[in-house]
Amino acid sequence: MADTNLAASGIYAIRHIASGRRYIGSAINIEMRWRHHRKHLRKGVHHSRFLQRVWDKHSESSFVFEILELVPDVAVLIEREQHWIDAEWTGRASIYNVCRIAGSTRGKRLSEEAIARMKAQRSTPEARAANSARQLGQKRSAETKARHRATLSTPECRERLSAAQRGRKATQEAIEANRLGHTGRRHSQETREKMRLSSSHRRHSEDTKQKISKAKTGHKLGPQSEAHKAKLLAHRIGRKHSLETKMLISRLAQARGPHTEETKTKKSLALKGRIKTPEHMAKIASSKRANRDKRLALARLDSDPGTL
């Protein structure tokens, strides 16, 4: 190995003299990479724990640095590195490389301590905020969305997701954090329209309906505060159902048929004691007059089409 070649690009090895076992790598500047390896090994923070352990045990003098091949074309560096790794590989103990594939972490096994440390680092508020900022404004292509939908709709994937969530209970801290995170959030008009179109043709199966009914049976909502009632009222003021919605409501009511005596009793008890305001009474009277006039007009039209 000539020192004049150290600044070139190529494939290198860090070889343990006694055993002959090597760490194989590639670099655009071999000399610079060798400095980084020595710096990390001397500090005890090298990414290859196999090489670090032997270095700590036998000292720096037990290793030599070698150039295996000079590669002027940097575009094929990874390919040539993989060639040398494959040629050297006879098992996990044959080389010091952590990863079997050059330029990839595939096959790398992390220790339990490393996994716990990574989880702790990623769960900090700063890490969450940084991850959110990176994803802000990102748009998935139609092909990516279609591929995700196809993957999530398979029975195997659904079963895995169900098994992962089964029996999980959110802590009170998680529930409170989720509530605070959604407080004050408002969907844009565009998002609302997308949600409406997405759910407009969705119909629950009979099995799903039975599950929802069973889950809600006996479930009672707590008393609403006056502020909450005022918000609900303000949200409903001025809302008008479209003609399609009115027709759908009418068809559903006709298909459902008259209320049972039990339902009538429940509604009666719920309305008992409620006092209607004068404005509410005026609206009811106005609505009744409008409906009566409409029925009379339709009756006249049926009896004599020439009257209108």
Image: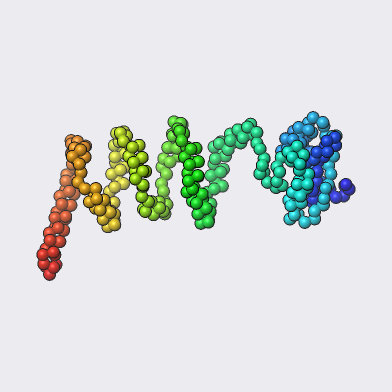
Q: Nearer the viewer, residue 178 or 201?
A: 201
- Residue 10 percent across, percent down from the top left: 80, 50
In the image, 246: left or right of 304?
right
In the image, 289: left or right of 242?
left
- Residue shown at the point (45%, 37%) measured from the top left: 178
Q: Nearer the viewer, residue 128 or 302?
A: 302
Q: Please give the count of numbered marks on the rendered protein.
A: 0
- Residue 122 percent across, percent down from the top left: 58, 38
- Residue shown at the point (66%, 42%) measured from the top left: 107
In the image, 196: left or right of 73?
left
- Residue 48 percent across, percent down from the top left: 73, 38
Question: Residue 37 appears in which quarter of the rendering?
Answer: top right
Question: Residue 197 appears in which quarter of the rendering?
Answer: bottom left
Considering every residue shown, the one lying at the far right of the view is 2
- Residue 247 percent across, percent down from the top left: 26, 55
Q: Quadrant of the C terminus?
A: bottom left
Q: Nearer the viewer, residue 154 or 4?
A: 154
Considering every residue shown, the one lying at the far bottom of the view is 306
In the image, 20: left or right of 158?
right
- Residue shown at the point (89%, 48%) measured from the top left: 2
| Res. 116 in view | yes
Q: Nearer the viewer, residue 42 or 184?
A: 42
| Res. 29 in view | no
Reply above or below: 250 against 60: below
Reply above or below: 200 against 211: below
- Residue shown at the point (82%, 32%) measured from the top left: 59
